[in-house]
Amino acid sequence: MELSHKLRMNKTPILIPIKGISKRCPNKNKELLHFTVKLLERSNCMSSAIVISDSTGLLDLSKKYGLKTHLEIRDDGQDELMSCYNFIKTTSSEAFILLPVTHPFRDIKLIDKCYDLFMNSKNEINFITSYIEVVNRERFHINFTDGNPTFKNNHKIRMGESCTIIPMIDGAIYMIKSDFIKKAALSENTNKTFWRGKFDCIKNNAPFIDIDSIEDMNNVSLLDFYINNKF
């Protein structure tokens, strides 16, 4: 008898690599983890998720959330893709889902949509990732010359109707074939090899904030407050 859709999906590992130290934004990963936990709970995928970290503190926190954990010894400069490979190479999984904690806002159906698209297109691609639609505001970018703002593109007026919508990869979720992550991890440049792979995209219908600074974290806290209080 064929396994149900949900049972098959729950056999796919969901990996959450979290490094212990964030130099530009201390405690970033600790503070962002609960957003990913919320998605997993609402998607009924907690049993499939594994947090991978070099920090025993983060692993202890993950256990309190009810997540499985895996302690890793990281190399200097190691990225999330290599952490995923080091874990997945010990399994027999055809593919895995990667959920970076640094993309806190995700469509509640994102895991389901990612899995469905992968199952329909896995013979043609190496991985799935997500994208958002953003407003192209290049027209309104400014320079400061002698303390005075001027438009970078020589536009004289600010016209909202001139904005266009453009798609942009946000990387809130990935579903990656195990044999492809092996190819990328063992290459001279993991990141370059990965993005040269064949991929497809699903739309993430959620706000986007790229978390690189303390100010970004403040914006996340404010947005989370407004969402939870329905303002």
Image: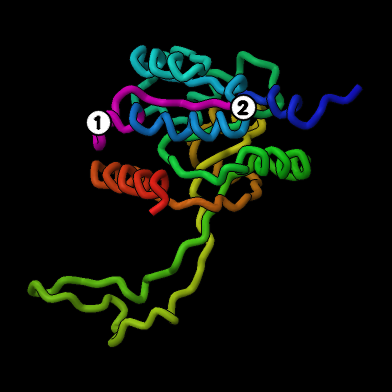
The answer to which of 51 and 6 lies nearer the viewer is 6
User: Percent from the top left, x then y, of residue 137?
Assistant: 38, 70
179 drawn magenta: no
Whether 125 is drawn above or below 91: the answer is below
The answer to which of 161 and 13 lies nearer the viewer is 161
Residue type, mark 2 in image: Cys
Which residue matches tag 1?
26
Q: Nearer the viewer, mark 2 or mark 1?
A: 2
Q: Give the distance between the C-alpha atoms of the residues marked 2 and 1, in whole angstroms.
A: 28 Å
Which residue matches tag 2?
45
* Residues drawn in magenta: 14-29
- For the N terminus, give its image quadrant: top right
Disc 2 crowd, CA 10 A, few/some/many (<14, 14-19, 20+): many
The answer to which of 231 and 83 lies nearer the viewer is 231
User: Percent from the top left, x then y, of residue 135?
Assistant: 45, 67
Please name the residue shown 37% across and 83% down the image. Answer: 159
Q: Is residue 106 left or right of residue 55?
A: right
Q: Is residue 178 left or right of residue 121?
A: left
Colour pattern = rainbow
